[in-house]
């Protein structure tokens, strides 16, 4: 059995901060570690540094660390295992991880649904469909199974990669029925049950579910609200011996952080040295709301990388069209893996996306302006109505990753918010293996006035939770019916 993942002493010290001047220091250390475990920054099941190893980076005595670890064991946040040292845990009943179940497809009238970080169709979609229908007859003489994809779209995707600084030919592109379908193709081609995969923590829930469905054993790689802890990432990559690493370096979902070129080069070097294949999700790469120089695609630093893309965030999710960019010569293996589940994406929607990409490869200026206005409205309302909620406004992406104050559970908050007519995904839905219950993702994809109303409802929900008013069954969920996890996109 593969040993438990470890948290380095340096990483632990960065998470804890300076406790040397606090009295009693052992209590401050225990509180800081308990919060880090509950938040998921120290993954459940990870082995903490030994008491001796932690004394130097923290600048405290071994007795202080020993007493802090004792407090954590007594409260259920640490378990001692022979041969594994001190392993992070959660008290019985506190471990939560959403793994399935959907809200009804038809949201009740008046309900604000923020479980999906995607926008309405942009202007011009109807016209693009009209032009695509005019081109459709050229494809009607065949069977319609274009397993590689419509040539025009494959070339449009390749052209966009070339514009971003990554030489790509249409022969390197496989069109899929969305990014999740593309990731499934890659997982079937690359992984075998039991293979280890490094994945960011937090991460996109559908990525985690797809990898688990492929039988992968997941190992969390920490992404902080300010970005990747590259020192810890490099160490973990080398220690896990993972077959693949699933990464979202472009406006990471859910945090929104962007990995710069230096970070990409460092990560690529570590993955190459470990023999680990990068599987890169670029679904949000085009959602740059701040502008400025963009880093090169990750595959420009790691030619062996397999890249997954989609039109769902840049254009419209209803197209259900995405792609995989493979290293030169690797496409055939992906096609062979693909035909075990489907034989190709719909031809008409591929033609529509090709039309839309001719107009704009990513967000149109109008769409960008609307998203910025919605984001600013959300941020302003949070500062006014929930001033104890902390967040950083990222350069791009479609949501804010919000840290709740101590004592406010995002799981409880999401349940209470449903009673207020607001659907939102709690932090544990994005966790690799438990924790993150003091975090919540709030997408800014609706008009500014709707975003302000959403925050009003979230604030009322927070008042419910703080007052201890447990949500009761409402008209949207029958009495006695099991609570359903939301579809998160």
Image (spheres, helix red, strand yellow):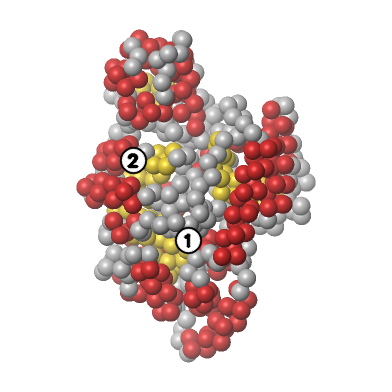
Location of residue 44 by image quarter: top left
Circle 1 sits on which residue? Answer: 286
Closer to us: 379 or 189: 379
Instruction: Give the residue drawn at x 32%, y 70%.
Output: 168
Mark 1 lies on a secondary structure that is loop
Q: Tell me where residue 483 appears, x and y as whole percent.
A: 65, 42
Q: Which mark is residue 230?
A: 2
Closer to us: 260 or 182: 260
Identify the residue shown where x is 49% and y is 45%: 255
Give the image location of residue 386, x and y in percent. Answer: 66, 35
Q: Do the residues labelled 1 and 2 touch (CB within 8 Å)?
A: no
> Which secondary structure, mark 2?
helix
Task: From this view, report whether residue 413 is shown above or below residue 178.
Answer: above
Residue 33 higher or lower than 190, as above or below: above
Q: Where is residue 474 in the image (x, y as percent from the top left)?
A: 76, 42
Pick whichever of labels 1 and 2 is earlier in the sequence: 2
């Amino acid at each position: 059995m593969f040993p438990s993942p470890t948290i380095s002493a340096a990483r632990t010290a960065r998470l804890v901060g300076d406790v040397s001047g606090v009295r009693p220091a052992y209590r401050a250390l225990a509180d800081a570690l308990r919060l880090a475990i509950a938040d998921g920054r120290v993954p459940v099941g990870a082995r903490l540094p030994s008491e001796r190893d932690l004394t130097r980076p923290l600048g405290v005595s071994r007795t202080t660390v020993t007493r802090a670890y004792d407090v954590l064991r007594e409260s259920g946040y640490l378990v001692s295992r022979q041969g594994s040292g001190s392993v992070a845990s959660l008290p019985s009943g506190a471990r939560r991880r959403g793994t399935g179940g959907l809200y009804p497809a038809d949201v009740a009238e008046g309900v604000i649904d923020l479980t999906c970080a995607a926008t309405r169709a942009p202007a011009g979609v109807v016209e693009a469909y009209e032009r695509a229908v005019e081109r459709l007859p050229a494809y009607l003489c065949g069977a319609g199974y274009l397993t590689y994809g419509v040539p025009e779209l494959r070339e449009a995707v390749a052209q966009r990669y070339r514009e971003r600084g990554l030489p790509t030919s249409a022969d390197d592109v496989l069109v899929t029925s969305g990014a999740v379908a593309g990731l499934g193709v890659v997982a079937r081609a690359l992984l075998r049950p039991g293979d280890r995969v490094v994945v960011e923590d937090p991460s996109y829930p559908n990525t985690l579910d797809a990898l688990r469905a492929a039988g992968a054993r997941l190992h969390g790689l920490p992404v902080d609200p300010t970005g990747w802890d590259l020192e810890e990432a490099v160490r973990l990559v080398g220690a896990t011996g993972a077959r693949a690493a699933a990464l979202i370096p472009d406006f990471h979902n859910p945090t929104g952080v962007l990995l710069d070129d230096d970070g990409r080069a460092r990560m690529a070097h570590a993955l190459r040295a470990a023999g680990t294949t990068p599987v890169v999700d670029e679904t949000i790469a085009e959602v740059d709301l701040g502008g400025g120089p963009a880093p090169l695609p990750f595959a420009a630093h790691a030619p062996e990388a397999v890249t997954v893309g989609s039109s769902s965030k840049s254009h419209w999710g209803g197209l259900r069209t995405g792609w995989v960019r493979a290293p030169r010569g690797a496409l055939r293996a992906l096609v062979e893996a693909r035909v075990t589940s489907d034989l190709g994406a719909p031809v008409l929607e591929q033609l529509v996306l090709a039309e839309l990409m001719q107009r704009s490869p990513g967000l149109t200026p109008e769409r960008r302006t609307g998203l910025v206005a919605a984001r600013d409205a959300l941020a302003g309302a949070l500062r006014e109505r929930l001033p104890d909620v902390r967040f950083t406004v990222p350069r791009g992406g479609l949501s804010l990753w919000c840290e709740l104050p101590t004592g406010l559970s995002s799981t409880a908050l999401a349940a209470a918010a449903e009673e207020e007519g607001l659907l939102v995904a709690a932090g544990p839905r994005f966790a690799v293996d438990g924790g993150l219950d003091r975090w919540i993702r709030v997408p800014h994809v609706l008009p500014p006035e709707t975003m302000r109303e959403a925050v009003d409802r979230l604030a009322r929900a927070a008042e419910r939770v703080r007052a201890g008013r447990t949500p009761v069954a409402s008209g949207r969920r029958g009495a006695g019916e099991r609570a359903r996890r939301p579809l998160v996109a």
